[in-house]
Image (tube, grey):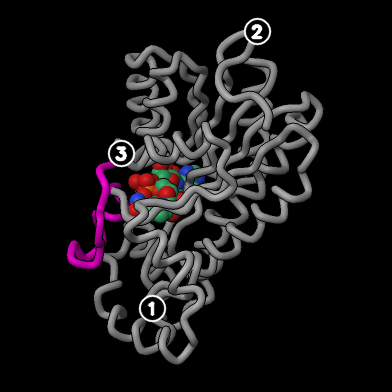
């Protein structure tokens, strides 16, 4: 495995996408506490400044890059800005993501496109931007934040589950392709962690809900250890990754139908806007 912590010629340079709230903001803060250089992205400029304040207060250096992972030019511009400031990237934590409920009885191709644009193509844009530099320097870590929701098609969650399944597979292929280059790929599959996204869930639908600090710490521990797939909390992740995936389809359908009504989220502000736009 390549480098674990710190670099000989200066603090580790890391980018965290989607750092304006939830896991991304807390990951940035905890990396700041290591004294690292932390580049942070997200669309809400004010919230990004608040994250930068927390990174600096914790002892790190922050580079604020407001913008969207869905915009090719912005992602390329952010990667260029990091190279200009620090000469390269050592870790890329590709965390930005969205999720809204969708029931197939009211299928929306637009909901699928919106979800994939951030959760899959957002990661793909960043991989294209950072991998050549990491391969050239012979070291680097890419960690993509997927989800336990990617292991089976969860009810009321088609676009989200499918996007995370795509991400798990995309990262797995990248991990295999990049063997021997010095670049490690870590796929992160959290269960439920407190964040703006999970604040919209029905509280009774989130077994073993974790504090944001603990979720971020579990992610960093897994990346430090260069685990191929980091999944937690074990009480939820072992049954999901190993039992649910091998359950016969008829048994899965029966179980999922029971879970369905619980898995409806309050819509996000973006989801509401999209629905308004698409209304006849
Ligand atoms: N919390 C959980 O239980 C849980 C479980 C499994 C996986 N995850 C995954 O963890 C990641 C973080 O989610 P979270 O739970 O911390 O939710 P969150 O608080 O809603 O954070 C999502 C972050 O993604 C950013 N984002 C969304 N769309 C973006 C875009 N187009 N461009 C740039 N940034 C964008 C948001 O920033 P802006 O809106 O300011 O752009 C925000 O900073 C997501 O990938 C999520 O799917 C979370």
Badge 3 is on which residue? 214
Image-based side of 73 in relation to 256, left or right: right
Q: Position of residue 56 (x, y in %)?
A: 38, 15
The C terminus - image quarter:
bottom left
The answer to if 211 sits in the magenta stretch is: yes
Give the magenta-colored segment's residue range: 194-212
Point 30% across, 64% down: residue = 267
Is 272 in front, or is 257? 257
What residue is drawn where x is 52% and y is 29%?
65
Judging depth in this view, the residue of 274 and 55 nearest the camera is 55
Residue 211 placement (x, y as % from top left)? 25, 43
Which residue of the protein is positioned furthest toward the top in this rendering? 9
Q: Is residue 62 visible?
A: yes
Q: Count neighbours of disc 3 (C-alpha within 10 A) and say few if under 14, some if 14 to 19, many if 20 or more.
A: some
Q: Quadrant of residue 91?
A: top right
Quadrant of the rendered image containing residue 44 = top left
Residue position for label 1: 155
Residue toward you, 130 or 216: 216
Element carrying mark 2: loop
Q: Is residue 227 above or below residue 116?
A: above
Q: What residue would you read off at disc 2?
A: 9
- Marked residue nearer the N-terminal end (1 or 2): 2
């Amino acid at each position: 495995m390549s480098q674990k912590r710190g670099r000989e010629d200066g603090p580790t340079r890391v980018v965290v996408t989607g750092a304006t709230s939830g896991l991304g903001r807390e990951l940035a803060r905890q990396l700041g506490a290591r004294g690292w250089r932390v580049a942070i992205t997200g669309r809400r400029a004010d919230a990004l400044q608040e994250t930068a304040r927390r990174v600096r207060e914790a002892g790190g250096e922050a580079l604020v890059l407001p913008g969207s992972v869905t915009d090719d030019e912005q992602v390329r511009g952010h990667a260029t800005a990091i190279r200009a400031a620090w000469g390269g990237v050592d870790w890329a934590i590709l965390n930005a993501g969205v999720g809204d409920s969708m029931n197939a009885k009211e299928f929306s191709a637009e909901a699928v496109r919106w979800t994939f644009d951030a959760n899959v193509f957002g990661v793909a844009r960043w991989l294209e931007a950072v991998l050549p530099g990491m391969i050239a320097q012979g070291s680097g870590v890419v960690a993509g934040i997927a989800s336990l929701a990617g292991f089976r098609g969860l009810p009321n969650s088609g676009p989200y589950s499918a996007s995370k399944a795509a991400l798990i597979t995309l990262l797995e292929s990248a991990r295999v392709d990049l063997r021997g280059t010095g670049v490690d790929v870590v796929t992160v599959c959290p269960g439920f962690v407190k964040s703006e996204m999970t604040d919209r869930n029905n509280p009774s639908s989130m077994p073993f809900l974790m504090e944001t600090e603990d979720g971020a710490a579990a992610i960093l521990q897994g990346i430090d250890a260069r685990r191929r797939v980091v999944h937690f909390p074990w009480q939820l992740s072992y049954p999901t990754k190993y039992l649910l995936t091998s359950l016969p389809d008829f048994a899965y359908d029966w179980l999922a139908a029971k879970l369905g009504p619980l898995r409806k989220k309050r819509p996000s502000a973006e989801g509401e806007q999209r629905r308004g736009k698409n209304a006849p």
